[in-house]
Image: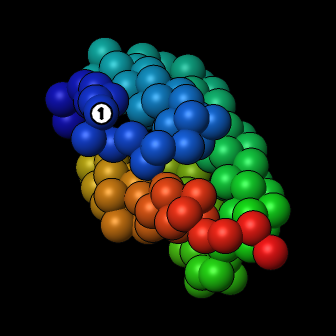
């Protein structure tokens, strides 16, 4: 996988979430360079841990945000996060047991994240744009 860079096309228009997505891109790049640089399994595992824990943090923050603004698709969105978290944890387990290819996993993660931002997270930004236009009750 080539290194990925964040660009404005990924912006959902909510600054806190955009900043966290940038950090996720950084962590994916770090993991990628450890994998392609043939770093030790221990180093790869620790950058994987950093990515897993930041992903957990980011999902919690994004979910709190959705909840606080009464985002209507909150529950469905949360399920997507739960599914991804499960897949990442499963991958880590397989990786530690020597069974999964980290490069394949990175491709999957990159596809998941970019698609999720473009198709799901962007809807949060859209909802907020419209909320500005709604009269205050
Ligand atoms: Fe999300």
* Residue 126 location, quadrant: bottom left
The quadrant the N terminus occupies is top left
Badge 1: few (under 14), some or many (20 or more) residues near its Cα, within 10 Å?
few
The quadrant the C terminus occupies is bottom right
Which residue is the site of mark 1? 8
Q: Position of residue 16 (x, y in %)?
A: 63, 36
Q: Is residue 64 left or right of residue 49?
A: right
Evaluate whether residue 74 shows in this view. Answer: yes
Marks counted in the figure total: 1
Residue located 67% across and 70% down the image: 135
Residue located 31% across and 16% down the image: 37
Q: Is residue 90 above or below residue 35?
A: below
Q: Position of residue 80 (x, y in %)?
A: 55, 74
Q: Position of residue 46 (x, y in %)?
A: 63, 27
Q: Is residue 57 above or below residue 23?
A: below
Residue located 57% across and 51% down the image: 92
Residue located 55% across and 21% down the image: 43
Q: Report whether the residue tagged 1 is closer than 8 Å to ligand 1.
A: no
Pick the residue in front: 3 or 34.
3
Pick the residue in front: 98 or 25.
25
Q: Is residue 114 left or right of residue 46?
A: left
Pick the residue in front: 103 or 9.
9
């Amino acid at each position: 996988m080539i290194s990925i860079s964040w660009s404005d096309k990924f912006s959902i228009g909510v600054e806190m979430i955009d900043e966290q997505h940038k950090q996720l891109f950084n962590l994916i790049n770090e993991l990628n360079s450890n994998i392609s640089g043939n770093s030790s399994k221990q180093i790869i595992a620790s950058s994987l841990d950093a990515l897993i824990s930041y992903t957990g943090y980011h999902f919690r923050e994004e979910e709190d945000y959705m909840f606080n603004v009464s985002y209507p698709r909150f529950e469905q969105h949360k399920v997507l996060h739960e599914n991804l978290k499960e897949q990442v944890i499963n991958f880590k387990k397989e990786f530690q047991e020597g069974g999964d290819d980290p490069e394949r996993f990175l491709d999957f993660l990159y596809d998941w994240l970019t698609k999720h931002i473009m198709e799901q997270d962007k809807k949060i930004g859209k909802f907020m744009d419209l909320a500005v236009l709604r009269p205050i009750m």
